[in-house]
Amino acid sequence: MSDAAAGSAQGVGQASTDAQKNVALWTQANAEYTNENAETNWALDEIDWGIWAIPESELNVLGDVSGLEVVELGCGTAYFSAWLAKRGARPVGVDVTPAQLETARRMMATTGIEFPLVEADAAETGLPDESFDLAVSEYGASIWVDPYRWIPEAARLLRPGGRLVFLRNSTLVILCSDDEMPAKEHLVHAQFGMKRFEFPEGGVEFHLGHGEWIDVLRASGFEIERLVEIQAPADAQTHERYAYVTAEWARKWPCEEIWVARKRNAGAGSTEPVQP
Ligand SMILES: C[S@@+](CC[C@H](N)C(=O)[O-])C[C@H]1O[C@@H](n2cnc3c(N)ncnc32)[C@H](O)[C@@H]1O
């Protein structure tokens, strides 16, 4: 994978090119497995997190979502939104890949769990200002969109006091990963300057160091409440599909992390836009 400079939002042209690369990757992924896996994922009653399927009841990052208006940024087949809807939330799913949304629509017809879907770049949703109580991303915008673009958009969409909860690969596992899986037990990337990663199999991901995440969140108007570093359980086996890390590695170091941030109330500190 290749790195580019950190610290500023992508230009419109590059952002659009990257989004199209991700559409191509996720159209193919939909044909290969996400469409077929949607039934299983939509049927789950317990919300779980990440490749080790840690139950929400153990991590308690979402809390009571009943009655909340929720936007999922990069919803894919929208099973996460469906889980939230089963708990009384009113989700809206946003994704840039038509095939993924088509699967979500098919699952809505099958299950009767219905909510709006928007085909858009998660950093330019076109949804109204301050119209949501909770913004979530489970490996959606959280890794596939430039944080200097989508974090300000999440802030714009949330009401003051609203929460942002997102799951991503840990910074550490990215620093230990090269083109050959699984992740190494030593650093293979420089952290300074990292941001955009383009993979040989297609798709463009974005990963920052923790200091930069804190800066972009705070500059966009958020206060950080939690950073949950996920540990693989003692009995976990290396995931068949997501074999970028072994269970043994992930018992020693976090390979995934969940951020919980809250949008500041008006007048409670700076909400100046992020400066390149
Ligand atoms: C791993 S899926 C995550 C979503 C969901 N949790 C799932 O597993 O189905 C990644 C999703 O991010 C979407 N995505 C990639 N780039 C995007 C962008 N710029 N704006 C919105 N969605 C994007 C892809 O289309 C894909 O559906």
Image (tube, rainbow, N blue to C red):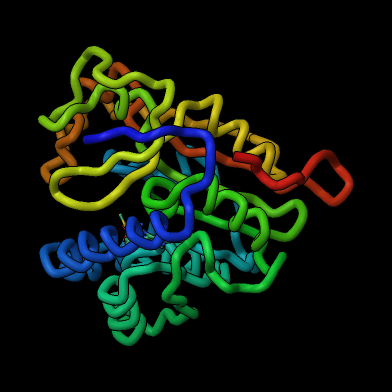
Whole-percent x, y for residue 37 in the image: 19, 64
Residue 181 found in image quarter: top left
Name the quarter where the C terminus is drawn: top right
Q: In this view, does 154 lie to the left or right of 119?
A: right
Identify the image quadrant of residue 214. Answer: top right
Q: Nearer the viewer, residue 132 or 8?
A: 8
Q: Which residue is drawn at 30% across and 39% down?
A: 197
Seen in the image, is 132 located left or right of residue 255?
right
**Residue 263 location, x and y as percent?**
71, 48
Q: Quadrant of residue 249?
A: top left
Q: In which quarter of the image is the N terminus?
A: top left
Residue 220 visible (yes or no):
yes
The residue that appears at 19% across and 52% down in the rendered structure is 202
| Residue 267 pos. (x, y %) | 89, 46
Q: Residue furthest top?
A: 186
Q: In the rendered view, tell whether residue 245 sits above or below residue 273.
A: above
For this rendering, which residue is in front, 198 or 129? 198
